[in-house]
Image (spheres, rainbow, N blue to C red):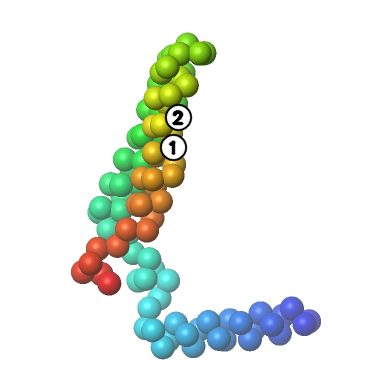
C-alpha cells in the first residue's frame, strides 16, 4: 500500500513536469536518419569485428588486436553516439 502511494505521487510529479516542458517521451527522444545510420554502422562494425576474430588464428595479430579494436569502437563509441546524437534543429 505504501509503495502504491509513493508510485502515485511520483507519477503525478512526473506528469506535471512533462506538462511544464511540453515534451512527450517520443518527441524528446526522436531518432533521425543520422541516428539510424550511426546505429547501423555500429552494428556492422560489431559484426565485422566478430568475423575478423573468427577468421584469424588463436594468437594472431588479427584476433588479438584488430578485432577487439573494431568491437570496442562499435560497442563503446559508435552505438552510444547514435543514441546520444541530436540535430541542432531539434534542440
Label 1, secondary structure: give it: helix
User: What x and y, as percent, mark residue 86?
Assistant: 29, 62
> Is 19 left, or right, of 36 in this rendering?
right
Q: Is residue 28 above or below residue 5?
A: above
Label 2, secondary structure: give it: helix
Q: Is residue 51 visible?
A: no
Q: Residue drawn at (44%, 42%), measured in percent from left and top? A: 75
Q: Is residue 83 visible?
A: yes
In-front residue for pair 21/61: 61
Q: Is residue 17 above or below residue 51?
A: below
User: What x and y, as percent, mark residue 32?
Assistant: 27, 58
In-front residue for pair 13/78: 78
Q: Residue drawn at (42%, 86%), measured in percent from left and top? A: 19
Q: Residues within 10 Å of mark 2 (few under 14, many from 20)?
A: some
What residue did someone put label 2 on?
Answer: 68
Report how many numbered discs are placed on residues in the image.
2
Q: Residue drawn at (43%, 24%), measured in percent from left and top? A: 65
What residue did someone put label 1 on?
Answer: 72
Amino acid at each position: 500500500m505504501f509503495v502504491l502511494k509513493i508510485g502515485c505521487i511520483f507519477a503525478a510529479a512526473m506528469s506535471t513536469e512533462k506538462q511544464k516542458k511540453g515534451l512527450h517521451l517520443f518527441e524528446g527522444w526522436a531518432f533521425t536518419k543520422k541516428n539510424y545510420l550511426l546505429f547501423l554502422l555500429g552494428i556492422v562494425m560489431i559484426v565485422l569485428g566478430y568475423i575478423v576474430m573468427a577468421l584469424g588464428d588463436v594468437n594472431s595479430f588479427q584476433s588479438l588486436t584488430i578485432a577487439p579494436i573494431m568491437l570496442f569502437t562499435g560497442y563503446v563509441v559508435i552505438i552510444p553516439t547514435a543514441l546520444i546524437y541530436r540535430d541542432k534543429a531539434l534542440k
